[in-house]
Image: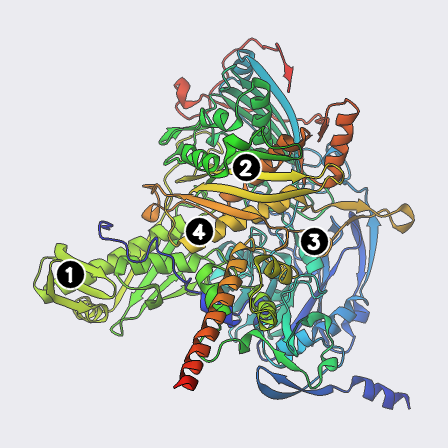
């Protein structure tokens, strides 16, 4: 009996995730966090760690659209979830407006906190397309950055929001134009 | 090379060359590396602050399933240390542990979890020694020595220099101000935890990927500790996820993974936990300071005697240099005819302190700039005018024989005074609000290497081929500051191409020429000069080949925007790639090198090499604060900073360095502290780190960070590539004293130590209400057995820069005025 229990306890967990638009199946030791499974079992090392205690925000990813500290989440709990990581932010060679703005405005220096910051910012802009600077600062207050002093990060997010909205307006104008014609 | 053509790359805002990898998550930091058959290593750390190891039993750990190897101090007979005079640390402590967290054993296992479990099976028997918690205790207890290689007790370094007879100068002053200050220690807190991956090659050679700022120094130390030929070791500095000085020292774990990989013939990796990063530390030294400064009634300095006492923690680290730096750069900002400093570093049973952004200089700069505020107050002078009236001059020598080149400090002061509305604010804002000003200077690269040698400080190699590709190799290390971007920009500008066309291969001792590393703000100037030379030589070949082909004089050839052409003749033009083909046809395989060695320091006395730099940056900062007198809470609405950078090679990055420096300085001013406590006697009485986590170690978040207005003062320095001086460290320095001075302007209390916490504000306000001196800060300076100073006559008094006999002076001791 004991031997059976032991074997069960050591059996890998097996789940299905939708990661960056692709369905993946993954099996892993059941104690692993989502962070560990992403980095170690799915080779998605773009997601970083700075504390593994939920203090720094470097491991933030989007789970079902919500920013989440992947170091605090057991991967087992994520079966069937939709996960977005930094690797899925750009579409092919085309940078996401957030990535472009971070490149243009110095939002990234050493780059280590950048994936967590970008994913948290995406979570914000997906829900609130026109955040104030104060709102951006609030949303990013759980992401520690040691290089930038945050100012250029906030500038970058504000610029990206502006660009996304501009594009949305352009698209709408074009569509309206087409409808009108 | 000629820089007369309009600059295409330098000075223009550009996306950094490594930016795309960073925003897409593609860049691989050390812990992102993974190799087939890789094993994982964890360290067992001492639970005792000071003890002898009587026995270690690793039998149970060794036989634990999944464990491949257990190492102890016995496997590492050779000590290491970044400074040749402080080789006092072992990868694993063989018999003597010196702080809680000192590594004593290592387990290599199939995964991290197994290694961590096996650590718990190692039994260490310790024999406790008395613990030294503070510098005062270190001075008072010469026995129970933490190290026995130094001359006296627990004193690590003792340095003293006197440039002109300071007591005489003080005696002739109208006022003497004597002030004590304390600067608490703090951690770099790079978000990337240190990680290393070692791999033994089939023929017994070693490759180490690691988070290091200084792969070259690590390379030398690996050869020493592993007792291998340096030629068989390759250190690859992965891009650092932030360094700030915290990845300058070789670290114990780097030797341990290397040894384990060599013994097992399999790759071995470690990544430190955040708690371990706080133990490894090497952060800001806590420093107690005493300033005695003479001033004329007009507010000019006559002389200064500075004494510092550094809490070094348990190991030497960069300590000998750190000790110098608490003194040597002090005279750079203001005319100071005579200067003396005594500096003493002691050992304590805490994690070792080392270099952090500003290395040893933020502490005295804090004291100096707060004392100036007190001087201005006493003499009823405007603090900005006081400073402006005595700034050092360009192309001058300080009393301490530092050669200043370009100097934009006056302009920095004018810019922040005007930008902040200083004249309308200082002394005029409502109660609870105030502004403070402070200035600083920092070196653009240390003038001498950490170990004595006559070789270049930076080397660059360039290769070009018929495809038009340009690859540049340099040992410099990208730690986030943008060194790869600087390298690409200088090569691109010189060859008339864009930075996209330049591939940078950096920080790899196996294939890149040596650069000493990312420390002392040296990369832009030293790597930059070497790159300029290498690219200039390549350009000469391209010009010669293109001129021959186009049948024009070489002097008329211009390289710009990917074209090589004759000035004034649009028809005579070719692409850059075509020019490379002609050059390769003419000269054969194309490759050039460049190197840079800083000029010799002007001082000739012993230890005159610490402090000199080819160029100095200058900064001035105004901070505005609002102090809540009920809670002591300090809010900082805005900071103005002017930085004399010479030239901003990429303004986006330069501004980023300035604002990042301000951020880090503000954290040190208000909250960051690496502090310790004793456990209660029933729990061992051990001295432990109070807050080894990011939740408890307070740092500034996006919500706390004020708006920063940056003024870049660009007056190109002739000693720097394209005139560019440092920007990575200098802008941090004036923030802390500017905050303290602003607090005084707001609520008329002096906080003479950092961090300036709400508790200290409340305590000072309470003292004020009780009619006592409204000041919080150190109130006594212990008896330190400083050594007899090296006496050097200042340049202004006819000295020749050598050590000389102190003139016979009457000892003056008159009219001491407490500030």
Q: Chain of mark 3?
A: B
- First in sequence: mark 1 or mark 2? 2
- First in sequence: mark 3 or mark 4? 3
Disc on res. B654: 4
Q: Chain of mark 2?
A: B
Q: Are marks 1 and 2 on the same chain?
A: yes
- First in sequence: mark 1 or mark 4? 1
In space, the residues marked 2 and 4 are separated at their CA atoms by 24 Å
- First in sequence: mark 1 or mark 3? 3
Mark 4: which secondary structure? helix
Q: Are marks 1 and 4 on the same chain?
A: yes
Q: Which residue is mark 3?
A: B279
Crowd around label 1: few <14 · some 14–19 · many ≥20 (10 Å) = many
Crowd around label 2: few <14 · some 14–19 · many ≥20 (10 Å) = many
Mark 1: which secondary structure? helix
Disc on res. B325: 2
In space, the residues marked 1 and 3 are separated at their CA atoms by 57 Å
Observer-nearest of B438 and B82 = B438
When asked about the image quadrant of residue B271, the answer is: bottom right
Mark 2: which secondary structure? helix
In space, the residues marked 3 and 4 are separated at their CA atoms by 32 Å
Residue B727 x/y as whole percent: 46, 47
Observer-nearest of B276 and A73 = A73
Residue B691 visible, this angle = yes
Residue B749 located left or right of residue B24: right
Crowd around label 3: few <14 · some 14–19 · many ≥20 (10 Å) = many
Residue B219 visible, this angle = no
A3 to B30, vertically: above or below = below
**Residue under the point 80% across and 24% down:** B770
Residue B550 x/y as whole percent: 10, 65
């Amino acid at each position: 009996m004991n031997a059976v229990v032991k074997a069960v306890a050591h059996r890998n967990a097996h789940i299905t995730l939708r990661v960056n638009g692709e369905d993946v199946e993954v099996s892993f030791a059941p104690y692993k966090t989502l962070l560990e499974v992403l980095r170690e079992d799915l080779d998605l090392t773009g997601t970083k760690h700075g504390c593994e205690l939920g203090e720094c925000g470097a491991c933030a990813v989007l789970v079902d659209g919500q920013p989440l500290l992947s170091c605090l989440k057991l991967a087992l709990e994520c079966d069937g979830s939709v996960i977005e990581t930094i690797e899925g932010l750009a579409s092919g060679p085309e940078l996401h407006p957030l990535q472009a703005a971070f490149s243009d405005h110095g939002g990234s220096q050493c780059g280590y906190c950048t994936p967590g910051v970008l994913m948290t910012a995406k979570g914000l802009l997906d829900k609130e397309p026109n955040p104030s600077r104060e709102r951006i600062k609030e949303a990013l207050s759980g992401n520690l950055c040691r290089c930038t002093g945050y100012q250029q990060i906030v500038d970058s997010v504000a610029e990206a929001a502006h660009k996304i909205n501009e594009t949305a307006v352009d698209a709408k104008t074009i569509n309206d134009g087409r409808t009108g014609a | 090379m000629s820089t007369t053509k309009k600059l295409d790359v330098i000075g223009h805002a550009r996306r950094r060359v490594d930016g795309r990898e960073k925003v897409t998550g593609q860049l691989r930091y050390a812990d992102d590396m993974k190799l087939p058959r890789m094993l994982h290593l964890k360290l067992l750390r001492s639970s005792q602050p000071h003890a002898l190891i009587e026995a270690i039993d690793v039998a149970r750990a060794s036989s634990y399933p999944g464990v491949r190897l257990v190492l102890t101090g016995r496997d590492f007979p050779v000590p290491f240390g970044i400074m040749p005079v402080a080789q006092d640390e072992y990868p694993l402590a063989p018999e003597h542990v010196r702080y809680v967290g000192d590594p004593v054993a290592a387990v290599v296992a199939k995964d991290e979890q197994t290694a961590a479990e096996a650590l718990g099976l190692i039994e260490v028997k310790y024999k406790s020694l008395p613990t030294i918690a503070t510098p005062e205790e270190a001075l008072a207890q010469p026995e129970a020595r933490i190290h026995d290689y130094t001359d006296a007790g627990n004193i690590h370094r003792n340095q003293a220099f006197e440039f002109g007879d300071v007591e005489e100068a003080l005696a002739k002053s109208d006022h003497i101000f004597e002030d004590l200050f304390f600067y608490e220690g703090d951690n770099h807190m790079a978000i990337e935890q240190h990680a290393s991956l070692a791999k033994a090659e089939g023929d017994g050679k070693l490759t180490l990927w690691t988070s290091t700022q200084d792969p070259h120094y690590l390379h030398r130390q690996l050869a020493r500790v592993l007792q291998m030929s340096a030629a068989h070791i390759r250190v690859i500095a992965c891009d650092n996820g932030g360094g700030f000085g915290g990845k300058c020292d070789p670290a114990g774990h780097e030797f341990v993974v290397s040894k384990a990989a060599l013994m097992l013939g399999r790759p071995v990796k470690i990544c430190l936990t955040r708690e371990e990063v706080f133990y490894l530390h090497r952060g800001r030294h806590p420093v107690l300071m005493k300033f005695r400064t003479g001033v004329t009634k007009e507010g000019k300095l006559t002389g200064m005697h500075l004494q510092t006492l550094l809490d070094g923690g348990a190991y030497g680290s960069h300590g000998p240099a750190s000790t110098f730096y608490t003194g040597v750069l002090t005279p750079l900002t203001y005319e100071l005819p005579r200067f003396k400093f005594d500096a003493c570093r002691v050992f304590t049973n805490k994690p070792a302190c080392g270099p952090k952004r500003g290395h040893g200089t933020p502490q005295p700069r804090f004291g100096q700039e707060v004392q100036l505020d007190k001087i201005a107050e006493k003499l009823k002078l405007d603090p900005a005018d006081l400073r402006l009236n005595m700034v050092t001059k360009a192309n001058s020598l300080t009393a301490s024989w530092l050669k200043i080149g370009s100097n934009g400090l006056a302009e920095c002061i004018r810019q922040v005074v005007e930008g902040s509305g200083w004249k309308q604010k200082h002394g005029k804002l409502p109660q609870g609000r105030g502004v403070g000003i402070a200035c600083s200077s920092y070196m653009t690269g240390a003038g001498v290497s950490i170990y004595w040698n006559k070789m270049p400080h930076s080397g660059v190699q360039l290769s070009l081929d018929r495809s038009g590709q340009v690859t540049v190799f340099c040992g410099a290390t990208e730690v986030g500051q943008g060194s790869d971007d600087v390298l690409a920009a200088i090569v691109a500008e010189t060859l008339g191409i864009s930075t996209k066309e330049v591939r940078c291969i950096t920080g790899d001792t196996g294939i890149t020429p040596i650069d000493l590393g990312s420390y002392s703000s040296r990369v832009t100037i030293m790597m930059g000069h070497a790159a300029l030379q290498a690219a200039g030589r390549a350009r000469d070949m391209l010009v010669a080949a293109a001129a021959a082909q186009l049948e024009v004089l070489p002097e008329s050839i211009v390289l710009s925007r990917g074209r090589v052409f004759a000035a004034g003749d649009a028809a005579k033009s070719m692409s850059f790639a075509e020019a490379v083909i002609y050059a390769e046809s003419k000269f054969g395989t194309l490759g050039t090198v460049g190197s840079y060695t800083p000029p010799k320091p002007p001082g000739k006395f012993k230890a005159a090499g610490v402090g000199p730099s080819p160029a100095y940056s200058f900064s001035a900062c105004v901070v505005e604060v609002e102090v809540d007198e009920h809670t002591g809470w300090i809010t900082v609405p805005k900071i103005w900073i002017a930085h004399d950078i010479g030239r901003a090679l990429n303004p986006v990055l330069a501004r980023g360095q300035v604002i990042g420096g301000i951020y880090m300085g503000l954290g040190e001013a208000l909250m960051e502290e690496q502090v310790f406590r004793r456990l209660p006697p029933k729990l061992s009485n051990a001295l432990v780190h109070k807050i080894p986590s990011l939740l408890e170690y307070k740092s500034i978040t996006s919500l706390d960070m004020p708006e920063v207005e940056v003024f870049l003062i660009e007056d190109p320095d002739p000693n720097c590539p394209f005139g560019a001086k440092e920007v990575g460290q200098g802008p941090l320095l004036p923030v802390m004293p500017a905050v303290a001075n602003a607090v005084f302007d707001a609520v008329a209390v002096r906080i003479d130590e950092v961090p300036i916490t709400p508790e200290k504000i409340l305590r000072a306000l309470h003292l004020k209400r009780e009619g006592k001196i409204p000041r919080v800060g150190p109130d006594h300076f212990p008896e330190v057995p400083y050594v007899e100073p090296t006496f050097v006559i200042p340049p202004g008094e006819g000295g020749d820069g050598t050590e000389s006999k102190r003139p016979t002076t009457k000892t003056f001791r008159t009219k001491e005025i407490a500030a």
